[in-house]
Amino acid sequence: MREIVLDTETTGLDPAAGHRVVEVACLELTQHMPTGRSFRRYLNPEREMPEEARAVHGLDDAFLAQQQLFAEVVDEFLAFIDDAPLIIHNAQFDLKFLNAELARINRPPLEFDRAVDTVGMARRRFPGAQASLDALCRRFGIDNTARTLHGALLDCELLAEVYLELRGGRQPGLDLDPTKRIAEAAGTQTVARPARPARAHAPSAEESAAHEAMLARLKAPIWRS
């Protein structure tokens, strides 16, 4: 199974207000595990970067002015994602922005039903708990200390680990023994012990004689009737 973890960075919160995508990144998974293949492009939004957005991802006007337009990378982007399911944290947000970019160049939109929204997965699994990427990294013990600023590719790498945990966690070697998984999670090891021969259970002559003497003292035991 091929899946694509996807994330974007933008100039704001709403493409209808003129905000644009400034970074798009994708990470390829097979059988829910990263393959090492990724796609990442910074984009020229053809507008100024608001200060509140720059504070989130650190991308400024001077840097972005040197980058390609979305129209120049769209074919490479679409070829990379192909028809794979898209794993996105808050899929509504990212697909809304990408579809606005596609509409600008008269390209068909990405269908929302191909997205797997990890926010929804987290809320179903942990009702009432925080479902942000940082909160889920803390819950699953995933190191996100490098995330001092938001970055689309780094967030894809973190989300790939979160997604695996939301699906039930890593199962090395396809070994489905739950006791082994618990031991591995606790950092313990299985200790090999030598086999012992079965103990003989047949009574000795003395034991048989004592048993018969005990039975002789009973009045009409039912097992002798």
Image (tube, rainbow, N blue to C red):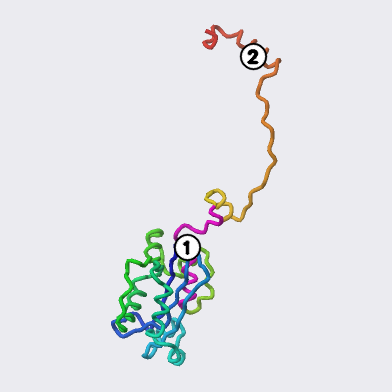
Q: Which mark is residue 191?
A: none
Sequence-earlier tag: 2 or 1: 1
Q: Which mark is residue 32?
A: 1
Task: Find residue 22 and report its image quarter.
Answer: bottom left
> Which type of secondary structure does the marked residue at label 2 adopt?
helix
Q: Which of 42/168 is in front?
A: 42
| Neighbours of disc 1 within 10 Å: few (<14), some (14-19), many (20+) | some
> Mostly what secondary structure, the magenta segment?
helix
Which stretch did the figure color magenta?
151-174
Residue linked to disc 2: 211
Q: Which of 79/134 is in front?
A: 79
| Neighbours of disc 2 within 10 Å: few (<14), some (14-19), many (20+) | few
Cα distance in 3D space between marks 2 and 1: 66 Å
For the residues carrying marks 2 and 1, which lies nearer the camera in this image?
A: 1
Image point 55% across, 9% down: which residue?
224
What x and y, as percent, mark residue 82?
40, 71
Residue 167 lies in the magenta-colored region: yes
> Which type of secondary structure does the marked residue at label 1 adopt?
loop
Disc 1 residue type (three-letter)? His
What x and y, as percent, mark residue 20?
36, 84
